[in-house]
Image: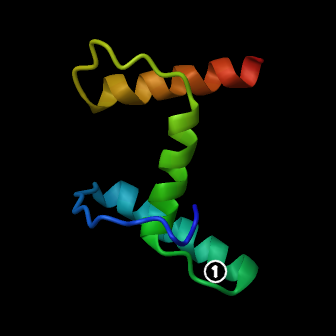
Amino acid sequence: MNKDDQYNRVNITLSAENEDFIKEMQRKIRIQNGRRLPRTKIISAVLQVIKKLKIDFSRIADENDLAQRIEEAIDQKLRK
């Protein structure tokens, strides 16, 4: 992401499990390179990857449906 990109503040609610997962990612990254990577940057990186996938967003009813579609798109990408 270019540092000239405009950012918008978005408040999100995460489960304790997902918050712990992001904190663990931050800890591992900090141990490896000595620098802290903010949660915002981690979530932005995940979104950058998802945007590159060909995901069928039709008839998604909930978080589980969306997660399944993302997993399917990743599986398809890996098979190529």
Query: Which quadrant would residue 58 be assigned to in this image?
Result: top left
Q: Residue at x 33, y 22 (%)?
A: 65
x, y percent for residue 78 = 73, 25
Name the element at disc 1: helix
- Decide if residue 77 is on the left or right side of residue 44: right
Left or right of 77? Residue 56 is: left
Q: Which residue is mark 1?
A: 30
> In the rendered view of the protein, which quadrant contains the N terminus?
bottom right
Q: Could you say which is closer to the camera, residue 1 or residue 75? A: 1
Residue 59 percent location from the top left of the image: 27, 12
Q: Quadrant of residue 75?
A: top right
Image quadrant holding the C terminus, namely top right
Q: Outermost residue toward the front?
A: 4
**Residue 67 in which image quadrant:** top left
Please, which residue is most extreme toward the top here? Answer: 59
Answer left or right for 60 relative to 24. Answer: left
Residue pictured at 65% horizontal, 17% vertical:
76
Looking at the image, which is closer to me, 76 or 52? 52
Q: Is residue 69 above or below residue 58?
A: below
In the rendered image, the vertical position of residue 78 relative to residue 40, given as above or below: above
Query: For the residue marked with disc 1, what is the amino acid?
Result: Arg
